Image (cartoon, rainbow, N blue to C red):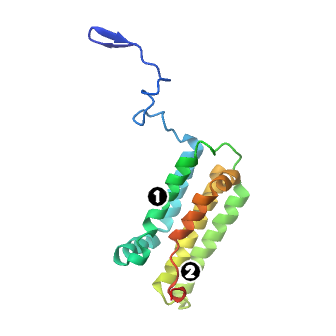
Amino acid sequence: MIDQGQHRFAVSLSDPVRRSRAHPQAHALGPRGRRFLLSVLFVTLITAQAWVSLVRGAIADELYSYAILIPFIAAWLVRQNQKAAPYSGPSSPVTGWILIAMAAVCALGGIAAWRSGWITSGTSWLTTQMAAWVLGVWGVASHRLGWDWLRQHRFAACFLAFTIPLPDPAIL
């Protein structure tokens, strides 16, 4: 019961008007979803130098201008499919750790190749780093939300691969 001056009225939490976007419980992620988002933020911070390079390239060259929107579009696709595929299955830590290890190998291999001179193009270095980011996101999704969840959202997950720019030798 809420008392506002002379008028008293009851408020039901099950009322759809009260469970709008402004209501904190209306769109709760839950602990698994929050841990997943924090893990994605961590992977993004690790690859921050690559993201800065990607954003600069997207601003400077229309060929890469689409790339910075891809994660937002993928998140929107997941959001649209969330009712059909909630995070209810078991997590897949082994698969997640394998994907995270592949991301680390890709990132460290790209850095080592850049420093040793095997990679001479900045875009090729960016390719290895963004591939590491995509593998890292897939790994934390598998680890935090489960392989079944990742499989149910495979289009959005595979759509993230478009953030990986083609290396200069691959562009004709």
Identified by mark 2, the residue type is: Gly
Q: Position of residue 149 (x, y in %)?
A: 66, 51
Please, is residue 170 above or below residue 68 in the view? below
Please, is residue 164 above or below residue 170 in the view? above
Q: Position of residue 71 (x, y in %)?
A: 49, 61
Left or right, 108 with respect to 25, comes to right
Q: Which residue shows up at 53% across the image and 42% down it?
A: 29
Dot 2: within a 10 Å radius of its alpha carbon, few (fewer than 14), some, or many (20 or more) residues? many
Left or right, 143 with respect to 46, comes to right
Q: Position of residue 105 (x, y in %)?
A: 63, 74
Q: Confirm whether residue 38 shows in the render.
A: no
Q: Confirm whether residue 112 shows in the render.
A: yes
Q: Secondary structure at mark 2?
A: helix
Please tell me the numbered disc located at residue 86.
Answer: none
Please tell me the numbered disc located at residue 110.
Answer: 2
Q: Which residue shows up at 60% across the image and 64% down it?
A: 158
Q: Which residue shows up at 43% across the image and 69% down it?
A: 66
Identified by mark 1, the residue type is: Phe
Q: Which residue shows up at 55% across the image and 77% down it?
A: 128
Viewport quadrant of the N terminus: top left
Q: Earlier in the sequence, mark 2 or mark 1?
A: 1
- Front-most of residues 113 and 160: 160
State which quadrant residue 32 falls in: top right
Q: Secondary structure at mark 1?
A: helix
Dot 1: within a 10 Å radius of its alpha carbon, few (fewer than 14), some, or many (20 or more) residues? few
- Front-most of residues 106 and 9: 9
Whole-Å distance between the Cαs marked 2 and 1? 25 Å
State which quadrant residue 68 falls in: bottom left
Q: Position of residue 148 (x, y in %)?
A: 70, 51
Camera-side mark, 2 or 1: 1
* Residue that carries the numbered disc 1 in the rendered image: 72
